[in-house]
């Protein structure tokens, strides 16, 4: 019996690009991502929150920003429907990039633009949108992006301001004083102490590094899901970061294979 010759590096790359994905994780995440940010964009357009970040004083709305927000709402609806995924995904990626580059340089917008660039290919790209092909490279690229995010954020937290608990102390006390944030009494009392904040800060680094490792290993799914929910439920409730938190939970839960043999 002849032994097949090993593929060259270009050959392995072509085989990876042509590989079909198992399961429906990419499609489910595309719908979840589009739905989360559709809610954000509808609220942003209605309430003018990004508009106010440009100038807190009363002023007419910037027509360019309004157009960008309307495009994001329309493309979000189409991405949920699953029609014209490549065209609407690429349009949404451009609009989100413009929102970040031209109007408000929020990291969440830049991350969303990258996710949209990848999700635009979740049904095979511009020449194959029959819904029958789910390219595996899209999921692989998204998981690699997630792992990088958690590693990078953990490393960036290794500094005196974060490790001392000072960053969390300032953030949470601002929420208490300015927003009258409804922390439970026992939690509010503990957040007012640097020792407790420092403990939380170190736990966050450990959790993010562990989650990054699980994403690289692609197992076990239950640990990744638990870490993602824990990290981002904390971020949502304690520091008022909701849409990014929902995005990251959905990404980890839906993209990481539950059966390691598929990943």
Image: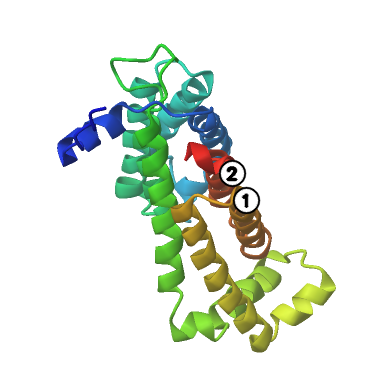
Which residue is at 58% across, 54% downward? 224
The answer to whether any part of residue 55 appears in the image is no
Mark linked to residue 253: 2
The answer to whether any part of residue 196 appears in the image is yes
Q: Residue furthest right?
A: 185
Q: Neighbour class for label 2 at 10 Å: few (<14), some, many (≥20)?
A: some
Which residue is at 70% across, 78% downward? 191
Q: Nearer the viewer, residue 257 or 131?
A: 257
Circles 2 and 1: CB distance less than 8 Å?
yes
SS category of the residue bearing label 2: helix
Q: Nearer the viewer, residue 93 or 138?
A: 138
Which residue is at 67% across, 65% downward? 238
Which residue is at 51% across, 40% downward? 261
Q: Which residue is mark 1?
A: 225
Q: Position of residue 74 (x, y in %)?
A: 46, 23
Q: Residue furthest top?
A: 130
Query: What is the spatial separation of the Cα atoms under label 2 and label 1, in whole angstroms?
Result: 5 Å
Which of the two labelled residues, at mark 2 and mark 1, occupies the earlier sequence position?
1
Report the side of 221 relative to 218 (left or right): right
């Amino acid at each position: 019996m002849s032994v097949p010759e090993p593929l060259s590096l270009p050959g392995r790359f072509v085989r990876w690009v042509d590989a079909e994905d198992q399961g429906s994780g990419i499609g489910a995440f595309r719908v979840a991502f589009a739905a989360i940010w559709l809610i954000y964009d509808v609220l942003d357009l209605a309430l003018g929150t990004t508009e106010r970040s440009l100038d807190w004083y009363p002023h007419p709305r910037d027509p360019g920003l309004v157009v960008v927000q309307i495009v994001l709402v329309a493309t979000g609806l189409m991405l949920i429907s699953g029609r014209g995924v490549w065209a609407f995904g690429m349009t949404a990626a451009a609009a989100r990039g413009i929102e970040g580059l031209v109007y408000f340089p929020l990291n969440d917008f830049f991350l969303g633009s990258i996710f949209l660039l990848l999700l635009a290919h979740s049904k095979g790209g511009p020449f194959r949108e029959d819904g029958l092909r789910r390219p595996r490279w899209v999921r692989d690229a998204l998981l690699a992006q997630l792992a990088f995010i958690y590693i990078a954020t953990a490393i960036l937290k290794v500094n005196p301001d974060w490790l001392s608990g000072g960053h969390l102390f300032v953030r949470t006390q601002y929420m208490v004083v300015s927003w009258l944030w409804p922390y439970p009494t026992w939690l509010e009392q503990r957040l007012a102490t640097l020792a407790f904040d420092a403990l939380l800060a170190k736990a966050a680094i450990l959790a993010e590094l562990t989650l990054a490792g699980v994403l690289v290993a692609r197992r076990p799914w239950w640990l990744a899901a638990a870490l993602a929910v824990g990290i981002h439920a904390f971020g949502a409730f304690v520091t008022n970061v909701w849409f990014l938190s929902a995005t990251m939970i959905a990404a980890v839960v839906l993209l990481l294979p539950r059966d390691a043999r598929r990943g």
